[in-house]
Image: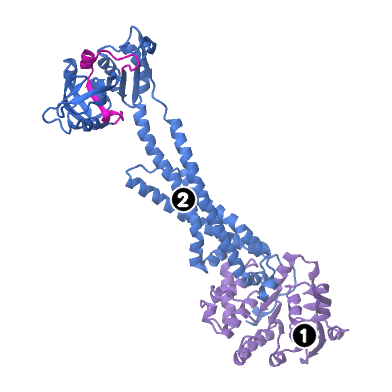
Amino acid sequence: MTVSALRQGTGSSNVPLIELTGVSRTYPGPPAVHALASVDLIVHPGEYVAVVGASGSGKSTLLNVLGLLDAPTSGRYRLDGTDTHRLGDAGRTALRAGAIGFVFQEFHLLAHRSVLDNVALGQLYTGVRAPQRLAQARQVLCRVGLGDRLHALPTQLSGGQRQRVAIARALVNHPRLLLCDEPTGNLDSATAAAVMDLVGDLHTDGVTVLLITHDPITAARAGRRLTVSDGFVVDDRSTDPHPPGADA
Amino acid sequence: MTRAWRSRGAGPVPATRLSVRDLLSEALAGLSQRPARTVLTMLGTVLGVGSFVAVLGLTATATGQVSATFSEQTATQVAIDDAGGSVSAGPQATVDSFPTDADARVQALNGVLAAGLRWPVGGGGTNVTTSLRPGAAIAQLSVAAATPGYLDTVELDMADGAAFTTFCDQHAMTVAVLGVAAAHQLGITSTTGAPAIFVDGVAFTVIGIATGSARDPATATEVYIPAATARIYFGKPLAYAPAAMLVRTSLGAADQVADEAALALRPDAPNLISAAHPPSASPVRADVLASLNAVFVVLAAISLVVGAVSIANTTLVAVLERTTEIGLRRAIGARPRHVAAQFLTESAAVGTLGGLIGTAVAIATVIVVALARHWTAVLDPALTLPAPLIGTLTGLLAGTYPALRAAQVAPLDALRR
């Protein structure tokens, strides 16, 4: 039994946001690669989880499965009470758009579109009308401290500012889960600290955060740290004396 | 403020969607990312649709011009032949079914502008010499007996002097009008000094030199003498080269004149006269139009294919270049159909824009060419107005494969790049 499964045994009263049961992901070879091996994991709403591990340990695969960008080979994944393996591509896409915000190491901003357009893109496929999209994008950009760069192009911004735009894009649709893949990987330490302060603020505001990082300082900011190795979650420890979901 | 960042409660998530307005907006934004490339991609369609419209427009304009000339000449001309002769009667047999006042009889018919009789003297080539060059070689020229009405009918274009008149004909004067080529052959350059020519030994005074005529291409090489004079010196027309009358009518009167001519000329024996109705121009016109169109439409189609390949190629390159963008769009909620629709809309927009520009350029070309040639520009609205849609169709067809490729991009693979 994994540490995650033991954690479930501690008795959570809330409905878990993430519930992985025996999830495996194998990439057919040859040779076949077992990127995730029977992972059990429960994350409650409001948690701040850092996933650490060496390169190739399976942490990116874990994030892709959690983000519905990849499907497990076996096992069950419930996101916010929805059994995802029952969903087709349209259902997975809808759940991804409505419930999950992504922050990538490479930012993935559209270089020829303004900062405002890049953030508004986060709601493009959700049926929100353009004026509302732009209004909300403007609001989120002010929140991340870029209210004065609305019409700048991403190429005119620093690395830290670009990552803030990416975070704003992830947040504009009010996701239940924010997945960050090495969000500070391309930033210097001072900029990285500022970005992580922003992520910390978002968590304080109630957003569930799950981030992948190599950096122990970044990981130390999280209330819970998962260590992944060879596809297994080998360690799951909480530094939060009152983790969300724990009984009072 | 804090509440705004709280996640929403659990519940059914509606399927993602993309409105038509957002689709168009995203497609245009995609195209404007690389304006130079978009313009270059558009060139193929501009050329294709442009040549298609220009070819049809120029063909219609040119054909209209040809038809106008062709119709005017043929629809206002009646040829009346002497059907009374028989070739088997022998080489010296003559035929003269036309009355001596034939010109006047036909000219009296309603709608006739001019009419005249003509026949080849001696049945063809005749020996002609000139007083200007005694001892020079005898020239074999085509000498034609013609009534003054004939010279009027063919609309003789005089270079020097004048054509003979009714007075000359009635008094059987020995005068001649030379075609410019015949005059050159005889060494006559001017009527000054009243040069003489000898037709089979009979002297004629040259009173005019004609450069040609609108209705008889042989004018330049002929020697015309008055019909009455010809009858006296060379006899009646021969049976194997009988007299023929040419009638110039007002527009629309030719058929009526052809119907009435035989009876007007020979009420006693109308069967001796045969009047030919003017040929209908429409089959000829249709043939010209069809053959010209076929050639040029094939050329335009080739241009369109080149345009389509250009759009397909550029769109495919764009899909490959924008794979990460596709991955991002998929991650934030785009379904494969949304991605395909965006790329298809982009290629259709390029095609439509190319079609519009091509049509505009082609219309301008047709108008400029028509103005330069003093023609009337002819453009069929039924073909010209929908022409930009050819560009749209080309763009849609060309964008189909790249759009399907884009729709198949897996978000995870795209984001790993």
Crowding near pointer 1: few (<14 within 10 Å), some, many (20+)?
Answer: many
Residue linked to disc 2: B51
Residue A15 appearing in the image: no
Q: Secondary structure at mark 1?
A: loop
CA separation in Å, label 2 and label 1: 71 Å
- Identify the magenta region: B214-243
Q: Is residue A195 left or right of residue A232?
A: left
Residue B10: x and y in percent read 75, 73
Residue A137 on the magenta span: no
Instruction: Provide the chain ID for the residue under circle 2.
Output: B
Which residue type does callout 2 highlight? Answer: Ser
Instruction: Provide the chain ID for the residue under circle 1.
Output: A
> Which image quarter holds the C terminus of chain B?
bottom right
Q: Secondary structure at mark 2?
A: helix
Residue drawn where x is 14% and y is 27% of the image:
B195
Residue B11 sits above or below residue B64 on the image = below
Residue B133 sits above or below residue B360 on the image = above
Residue linked to disc 1: A244
Q: Is residue B206 left or right of residue A8?
A: left
Provide the letter of the chain coloured purple: A
Provide the letter of the chain coloured blue: B
Viewer-proximal residue, B338 or A29? A29
Residue A54: x and y in percent read 75, 87
Residue A211: x and y in percent read 71, 84
| Tags 2 and 1 both on a single chain | no
Which residue type does callout 1 highlight? Answer: Pro
Residue drawn where x is 78% and y is 92% of the image:
A241
* Foreground disc of the pair 2, 1: 2
Outermost residue, top side: B268
> Which image quarter holds the N terminus of chain B?
bottom right
Image quadrant in which you'd find residue A158: bottom right
Residue A5 sits above or below residue B211 on the image = below
